[in-house]
Image: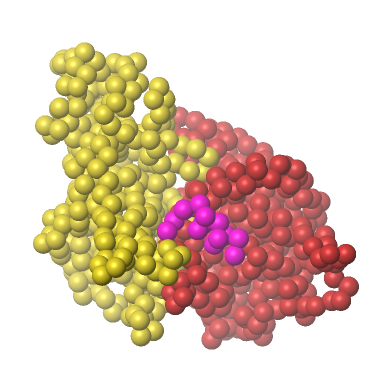
Amino acid sequence: MSKQEELRATARRLLAENRVDLILGYTAGTLPLRTTPFFARTPAEADLLVWNAFCEYNLTNYLPRYTGNRVGIVVKGCDARSLVGLLQQNQVQRERLYVIGIPCAGVVDRRRVALLAGGAEITAADITGGEIVVRGRGFEKVLPMEEVLFPSCRRCRYGNPVLADVVLGEKVPERKETYEDLAALENMPAVEREAYFAREMAKCIRCYACREVCPMCFCKQCFVDGTAPQWLSRWVGTADNLFFHLGRTMHLVGRCVDCGACARACPVGVDLMAFNRKMIKDAEALFGYRAGLDPEAHLLLGTFDPNDPEPFLFRG
Amino acid sequence: MIIAKDDLPTFLDGLLGTYQVFVPLADGGESRYVPLAPGGTFTWQGVNTRKPPKEILFPQSEVLYSYEVGGDRVELREHFDKTKRVVFGIRPCDARSFLHLDRVFLEQEHQDPYYRERRENAVMVGMACLEPASTCFCTSLGGGPFAADGLDLLFIDLGDRYLVRRVTPRGEALLREQPALFRPAGEADRLAAREAEEKAKSLMSPIPDLSGVKPWLDAGFGDPLWDRVYEKCIGCAVCTYLCPTCHCFDLTDEAEENQCVSGVRIRTWDTCAFPLFTLHASGHNPRPTGKERFRQRVMHKFRYFVENWGEAACVGCGRCIINCPVNLDIREVLREIMARAAGAGVSA
């Protein structure tokens, strides 16, 4: 039985036995390379659930909306870590959840596929074995899956969900976690790095898709939306955009699990992962902290340890 | 008229003495209309740019006026942008969106002078769509891949040359600035253009019939449809900020550091997707959840705008479909509405 068939059977059973009110999962999208979030409420609807490498959304983002429901939710490895974060922060109640974990070998980076396919409109995409075949008007291109996975997925150590009530299908091999991608930015002279971030920030249109799609951005009111006082100008420009993104980044330290939902949601391709991954790397290097592994653990920024390194202090 | 493709850079370069020239450009994840540098070239392969040319007439952020309090009076200085511009390569759907923006900003009791100055100083040069994308549905909304509404000139790509349709006297005047580059079109050119148009139309996805949408929406404000249809919406501004017709804005004052005695009043895009959109000073919000906000977007585009102007505030460009972070497809929403309309026996 494929993971998708197993998923449908599991969801059907949960709904038929009235163990959950709804299942948060994925169904077929209206565009190639896409699926779309789906809220199945009947056993018949369970048969519309899909599982494939286009299931790019982190559905735990929706959970805080359903505090009054018993929810079944489909999680990939990274999503499970977000769920741990939500539990740590009391945003969801474990006893109302039924967690369907699916070991994940990575999701497709649709923008990278579009780039590698030459930029012409892709009208169909199929995954067969280790390859993805994309077609458009007058062209067909075969690309190795490994080359089109989202960058975070290519070095993801936690493809197997750390938390689940049921795990569907075989485990996936653990990948080697590296931060090689950050080396270029870290080694850049400060002036060039500043110019790089200025360019990225100039692209931002402040649609806040990164924030809205992020399971960790659950503040009732974001600091940039305050009006009395108004912390951030409505002006959309490099400096104001940077203020928002740095504020968000610092607020995600020790909470971001590198799921990449923000970068995939960004309509203008801002390099959001550079911020996030640098914070993830520092949290681990300085404090030995990895987000989203233990629901009982305290948050990094919610803990004080006299032995914490303080290299920024005099004689720290 | 006909201009050889090889002469296009000369034509655009020749405009630079008088105009700021915008052309479509793709750069990394971004694609939008950008100013052309002298001697600069561009190639554009796609259908629509990620960002529509709307921002040229209606920037995401603009200073309306600056103020300074001094002695016994307040000095106000308005910031009008009278730059002469040519926007080249506009797709017919985006050109049509200018007509919608004109209605909002110009065709009411009070005109918006900031928009008007930009609009009156811009010459709009279109580029017909030879190969519409699968997400295009302009023909469902009164447009078409070769439509010239909202344009001053329409270029049609005929391989090694462009056939140029003169739509307005202003467009015609632009061609007369460099007459040596243009020659009259012949019968063969016109035939080739007609064939290209037929081919482009045949490539459009089948046209959904949207005639029942407005009548259903008239009575559908409280329908249970809204309880579910927004459910996957995350509440970001991608669909509205990338929409060529969305025009809601916010006004704020930006005081400078010197005790508020001087500053600027700015206008920035706003969106019905955000909680702040209709948040009252009292703290009450008449659109408290994603449901009401999503309904507002659909209602404004397909009901209120139709009531006010006789047409939907949508040109079928497909940007909201392509760029929605969760693939919430407006065509699906309209289909669901049509299905309900058919079930309820509602018709136009």
Q: Quadrant location of residue A71?
A: bottom right
**Observer-nearest of B274 and A14:** B274
Question: Which secondary structure is most common in the magenta stretch?
Answer: helix
Q: Position of residue B56 (x, y in %)?
A: 32, 45
Q: Quadrant of residue B205?
A: top left
Colour seen for chain B: yellow
Residue B189 vertical placement versus B211 (above, below): above
Tell me, what colour scheme is on the image? by chain
Is A218 left or right of A31, judged from the image as shown? right
- Chain A as rendered: colour: red
User: Eyeballing the image, is B228 above or below B310?
Assistant: below
In depth, the one of B49 and B57 nearer the eye is: B57
Q: Position of residue B308 (x, y in %)?
A: 15, 63
Query: Can residue B213 be spotted in the picture?
Result: no
Q: Which residues fall within the magenta stretch?
A: A235-247
Q: Nearer the viewer, residue A214 or A130?
A: A214
Q: Is residue A3 left or right of residue A140?
A: right
Nearest the eye: A185 or B1: A185
- State which quadrant residue A7 falls in: bottom right
Residue A263 in view: yes
- Residue A244 in the magenta stretch? The answer is yes
Q: Quadrant of the N terminus of chain B?
A: top left
Q: Find out whether residue B300 is within the magenta segment.
A: no
